[in-house]
Structure formats: C-alpha cells, structure tokens
Amino acid sequence: MSSDITGILDDWPYDGDDNVRIIEADDGRSVLQVRQPLGLEQYEMDGRPDGIRPGGYETFLEQLEHRLAEFESSHGSDEGFEISEEDASSLHNEGIIFYYRYLLLFQLSDYDRVIRDTGHNLRICDLLERFAQKDEAEAVLQFKPYIYRMHSVSQAMSHVQRHENSEARSILESAIDVIEGMQEIDTPAFQFERVRSVNYLRSAIEQIEESPDDPRSQLQTELNEAVEQEDYERAANLRDRISELP
C-alpha cells in the first residue's frame, strides 16, 4: 500500500473557512480531520485524540488517577503522593492535544464532547495543583481560567440548544464567580486569561438575555417585520423555517 496522500489532498483542497470534517474510517469509527495548507491532521473522536492508550488506560490521566487510588488504598490517605517531573510533563502534553481537539469540537458545536474534554483538562489541573511541584503545576494552571470558561460556555450552549436560557445564564454567572475566586498565579498568562474569560462570560450572558427562549417567537417577529417591509422573499423563507420547527 502506498503512503502517498496526494490523492486525498487533491480530493479535499485547502479552504481556511471550511477545513474540518468528520469521516467514517475503514473500521466504521468516526474520526475528525483537519485540512492544513500542507497536509492533514486526524483526531480520534473519543479517548485520547492520538489514539494512544498509555499503560492500557484510555488516557495518561486515568493511569495516574489509578496510581493515586492504589496509593490511597495502601496508605490510608493521599498524603505523601507526588507527581514526578516526567509525569507532570506527560499530563501537560496530554492536555495540549485535548485542547486542540476541543477547539475543533467547539467549532462543530459538539458541546457534549467539549464538556468532556475540558473536564479532562480540569482534572489534570486538580492533580497538578495537589501533587506536583509549584513550577510544574503553574505551567498548566495559568490557563485554568480559559479551560473553565470553555467548559462553562459549552455547558451553557448545550442548554441554549434546548431553549433553556435561564439554566444557561445560571451556569455562566456561577463560572464568573469560580474564575474570579481562583487562586492567584503570578504570570501574565493567568492575569490575561482571567480578565478575558470573565469579560467573555459577561458578554455571553448579555447575548442570552437578548435572545428569546422561544425561537418560534423570534422568527414570527422577523416574519411580521418582513411583511410590513414588503420583503416577500425573506417572508417566504421565514415561513419555511417556522414550518420546520418542532
């Protein structure tokens, strides 16, 4: 079998505005692909994005959590458990590839998987904060406001998709409190991400408050305006959209 992927690249020319797709692999599983200017990236949809199973576990995080559970079982507590520099580096690297995937999933509005992947990275933050050396932990923890923001926004968007705007607002308001209450880390990245995340969440709350819970009501309002303006082509399109609503 040839390793040449020229045919694949020719069949999917690079387009920066449309460069992400989900395809069915030869074994029937779904994989996420990204067309880059000079090639392709491919991510597993579930498990580790690179498909590797460290020590037989789905992720290195799970392997380390299992080691922690065994330590607690044999010692009666987690006191004395430590994350080595090598393990901290492995967690950091795993967090990065999860970050790459959840950005793509967010772009595709796959909010449930974004919640899962950001949750994974928040668990990494928790382990590093508790058991790693300060410098090794802060290399990841300085980005915790951003991770938590993406986690919360995805939870909120999942509710918005079900027209549960009040629940979405509550999640975002709570997220602001959590981020503002995070332990201070003296790095420019942490300061920037905390301010940016809080501002983003406040803006998201405003957008939710401006949008109605009932999409039919919003479309009907737009339809009435289109009829009043004698924009009959737009009115016809809006009628079709209303008729397609459940």
Image (cartoon, rainbow, N blue to C red):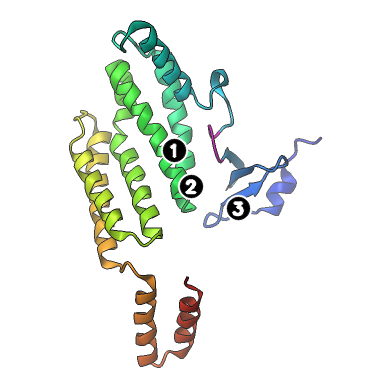
Segment colored magenta? 45-49
Which corner quadrant of the image does residue 121 belong to? top left
Q: Mark 3 is on which residue type?
A: Tyr
Q: Quadrant of the N terminus?
A: top right
Q: Do residues under tags 2 and 1 come within 8 Å of each other at their CB atoms?
A: yes
Residue 185: x, y in percent?
22, 28
Q: Mark 2 vs mark 3: which is more N-terminal?
A: 3
Q: Mark 2 vs mark 1: which is more N-terminal?
A: 2
The answer to whether residue 79 is left or right of residue 108 is left
Considering only vertical position in the picture, is 168 above or below 47?
A: below
Q: Residues within 10 Å of mark 3 (few under 14, many from 20)?
A: some
Considering only vertical position in the picture, is 196 above or below 205?
A: above
Of residues 122 and 142, which is closer to you in this image? 122
Q: Nearer the viewer's eye, disc 2 or disc 3?
A: 2
Residue located beneath label 1 in the image: 117
Q: Mark 1 vs mark 3: which is more N-terminal?
A: 3
Residue located beneath label 3 in the image: 14
Q: Mark 2 is on which residue type?
A: Leu
Residue 125: x, y in percent?
33, 28
Separation (CA) of disc 2 from disc 1: 9 Å
Residue located beneath label 2 in the image: 105
The question of residue 99 being in magenta is answered with no
Of residues 48 and 190, which is closer to you in this image? 48
